[in-house]
Image (cartoon, helix red, strand yellow):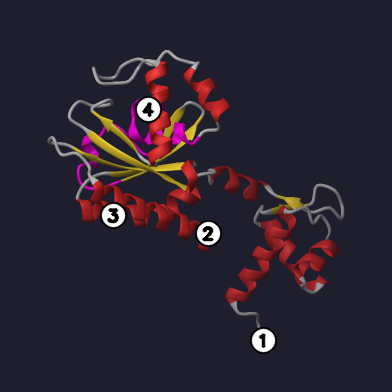
Amino acid sequence: MSTPPNQSLARGLAVLTAAGRGARTLAALAEVTGLPPATVHRLVLTLEAQGFLERPVRGTIVPGPALTQFAADFGPHDRLAAIARPLIRRLAARLRAPVQLAVLEGDMATYLVKEGEGSDALFTREGGQLEAYCSALGKVLLAALPAPEREAYLAGGPFPPLTARTITDPALLAAELERTAARGYARDEGEVDVGLSCLAVPVSGGSAALSLSLRGGVRPGIRHRAMLGACATAIEEALLTKS
């Protein structure tokens, strides 16, 4: 009787995982996976034919070009974005406003997810970057940095104004980041775009940040902060559950 497809897939993934973690021979793969050597040999031949494994030297098995390209195409933040997106989409639908998720890369806030009514009116885009000092999202991310890194960032100005309300003085920005760290959220009142009011909260201790943007003189309040915080917690729990 042939092996059920799902079991074959599970065994193939087990072999790939073992090879990716350093098992370099058929015997080592069999030992790590607990599969019979004949099964491992058959799976290696199949995965080798597809480019997921290769044998550059007789008896040595290493990840192949298809596997390494797959890993390269799947960026370090893709998992976070994939897990967070349905939760963010649900929140954005309830609020009928744009909700965004970003991480800090270098000195820039990189936007991973952008969902909700009015999103097209925002100049941000998924995969795009914005200077961190001027947005609520960026302030949350900067506030979460260790003190030496935060100080290095503040010393690396200048901080050009995007609007008349942008905080450009390093001392004032330092004080704003201290307030953000102490209270657990950040605001942006027209600092990036005149008439745009944003509120952001940390996700996973500030390794990411979640924000809500409102226009028309409406300022996010306590209810919005609670909803953002609940979504951030749900994202954190989903990341742990799916790890």
Residue occupying image coordinates x 23% and y 17%? 164
User: Which stretch did the figure color magenta?
Assistant: 115-144
Q: Amino acid at mark 3?
A: Leu
240 vs 33, left or right, is left
C-alpha separation, residue under disc 3 versus residue under disc 2: 20 Å
Is 72 rendered above or below residue 32? Answer: above
Image coordinates for residue 216, horizontal then vertical, percent: 12, 36
Picture quarter containing residue 201?
top left
How many numbered badges does the structure rendering display? 4
Choose the circle earlier in sequence order: 2 or 4.
Answer: 4
Indicate which disc residue 1 carries. Answer: 1
Residue 113 vs residue 176, the one in the foreground = 176
- SS assignment at label 2: helix
Task: Verify CB contact (< 8 Å) between mark 2 and mark 1.
Answer: no
Q: Which residue is mark 4?
A: 176
The answer, for residue 34, to whether it is visible in the render is yes
Mark 4 nearby-residue class (10 Å; few <14, some 14–19, many ≥20): some
Mark 3 nearby-residue class (10 Å; few <14, some 14–19, many ≥20): many
Q: Which residue is mark 2?
A: 240
Mark 2 nearby-residue class (10 Å; few <14, some 14–19, many ≥20): few
C-alpha separation, residue under disc 1 versus residue under disc 4: 67 Å
Is 4 rendered above or below residue 48? Answer: below
Residue occupying image coordinates x 37% and y 15%? 169
Indicate which disc residue 91 carries. Answer: 3
Picture quarter containing residue 76?
top right
C-alpha separation, residue under disc 2 versus residue under disc 1: 38 Å
Choose the circle earlier in sequence order: 4 or 3.
Answer: 3
Residue 106 vs residue 30, the one in the foreground = 106
- SS assignment at label 1: loop
